[in-house]
């Protein structure tokens, strides 16, 4: 019993490109020679332009990622600035942790959504 040959992704892609090239050439070969050269030249030109554009995008993504990593290493924070916690936050946090208030009651007393309140509690407790 012979092992089944499994084609790699690269091999499948090469095969697909070969078939596409053969299809394009068979269509172009039916035209008059001067017209077929013009269309083939336009095809090759468009192909090179597409590859160059793809490389440009990839380089831009890489440079952007490098810039973001460098900024984070310098301690730059991204995103909107956090609003300061309300004056009664600590009382409400302790009341909630102590069971005197529900999460929603404590958040409402602080003028925050329950999710924002819970995130703020987590942030404060992890920082302390």
Image (cartoon, grey):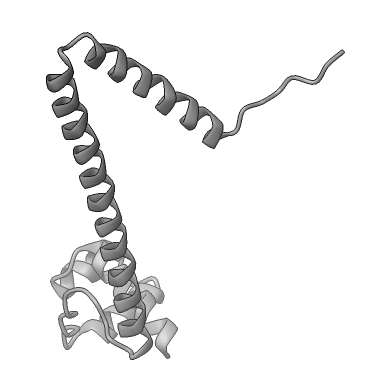
Residue 95 seen in this snapshot: no
Q: Tell me where residue 66 sits by quadrant.
A: bottom left
Picture coordinates of residue 49 (x, y %)? Answer: 21, 46
Picture coordinates of residue 104 (x, y %)? Answer: 25, 62
Horizontally, residue 39 falls left or right of residue 19, namely: left
The vertical placement of 73 against 96, above or below, is: below
Front-lying residue, 103 or 125: 125
In the picture, the quarter occupied by the N terminus is top right
Front-lying residue, 82 or 25: 25
Q: Residue at x 25, y 58 (%)?
A: 56
Q: Tell me where residue 39 sits by quadrant.
A: top left
Q: Residue at x 48, y 31 (%)?
A: 14
Picture coordinates of residue 102 (x, y %)? Answer: 31, 64
Residue 48 seen in this snapshot: yes
Q: Residue at x 30, y 12 (%)?
A: 26
The vertical placement of 87 against 64, above or below, is: below
Picture coordinates of residue 5 (x, y %)? Answer: 71, 23
Q: Tell me where residue 117 sits by quadrant.
A: bottom left
């Amino acid at each position: 019993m012979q092992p089944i040959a499994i084609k790699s992704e690269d091999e499948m892609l090469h095969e697909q490109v070969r078939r596409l090239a053969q299809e394009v050439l068979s269509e172009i070969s039916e035209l008059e020679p001067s017209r077929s050269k013009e269309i083939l030249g336009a095809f090759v030109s468009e192909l090179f332009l597409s590859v160059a554009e793809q490389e440009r995008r990839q380089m831009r993504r890489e440079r952007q990622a490098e810039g973001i990593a460098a900024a984070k290493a310098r301690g730059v924070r991204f995103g909107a600035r956090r609003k300061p916690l309300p004056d009664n936050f600590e009382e409400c946090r302790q009341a909630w942790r102590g069971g005197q208030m529900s999460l929603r009651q404590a958040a409402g007393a602080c003028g925050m959504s329950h999710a924002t309140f819970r995130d703020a509690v987590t942030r404060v407790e992890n920082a302390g």
